[in-house]
Image: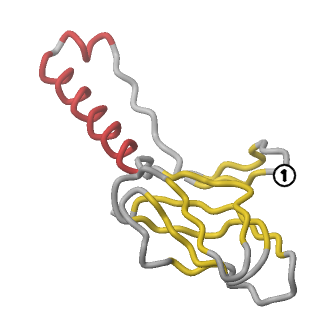
Amino acid sequence: MSATVRSDGTVIQHIGRSAELEQVTAEDVKDPERLARALNAIQVEVARNAAATAQEWVEFEDVSSSLGTNISIRHNLGGRVRWAVVQWEPTSANGYNPFEQHADTDANNLVLSCNEDGTATVRIWRAD
């Protein structure tokens, strides 16, 4: 599922696959075999949609970075994570590589080594 979002947070475009809506009629529910097929089809779609949207992520805004320090972000996702800087406001003229993952990272804390001064928004999600 994708969307284009304005700076004020409103969704201006939603891009998704179109789905054909199959009607379940009163006749369908009178016939146990047709009813079972309809319910199975619904269960399959619900499971597909749940799996497609199950990725959990946490976004941390205004993460302050100072060159040469480490910061710890407690995410409580309970496992290996991926992360990305989704917004960066530098306060110095260094290159765009504000963070590197530090070896002290564990299942619930992301520890980042700061390579630059600035403020970031960091998104963290489970790797599995």
The colour scheme is: secondary structure
Q: Which residue is pictured at 49% across the width and 78% down the height?
A: 102
Residue 114 locus on image (x, y percent) = 65, 78
Residue nearest the observer in this picture, 20 or 42: 42
Task: Determine whether 3 is above or below 46 in the image.
Answer: below
Q: Which residue is pictured at 37% across the width and 42% down the height?
A: 50
Residue 14 locus on image (x, y percent) = 67, 49
Query: Would you call the spot at circle 1 few (<14 residues within 10 Å), some (14-19), or many (20 or more)?
Result: few
Residue nearest the observer in this picture, 63 or 126: 63
Q: Is residue 55 left or right of residue 44?
A: right
Residue 80 locus on image (x, y percent) = 36, 65
Q: Quadrant of the C terminus?
A: bottom left
Farthest-out residue, bottom = 95
Q: How many marks?
A: 1
Q: Is residue 68 left or right of residue 36?
A: right
Residue nearest the observer in this picture, 4 or 63: 63
Q: Which residue is pictured at 34% across the width and 59% down the height?
A: 79
Task: Determine whether 30 is above or below 21 in the image.
Answer: above
Q: Is residue 42 left or right of residue 68?
A: left
Residue 10 locus on image (x, y percent) = 78, 42
Task: Determine whether 37 is above or below 106 in the image.
Answer: above
The residue carrying mark 1 is: 7
Q: Secondary structure at mark 1?
A: loop
Task: Determine whether 33 is above or below 42 in the image.
Answer: above
**Residue 62 picture quarter:** bottom right
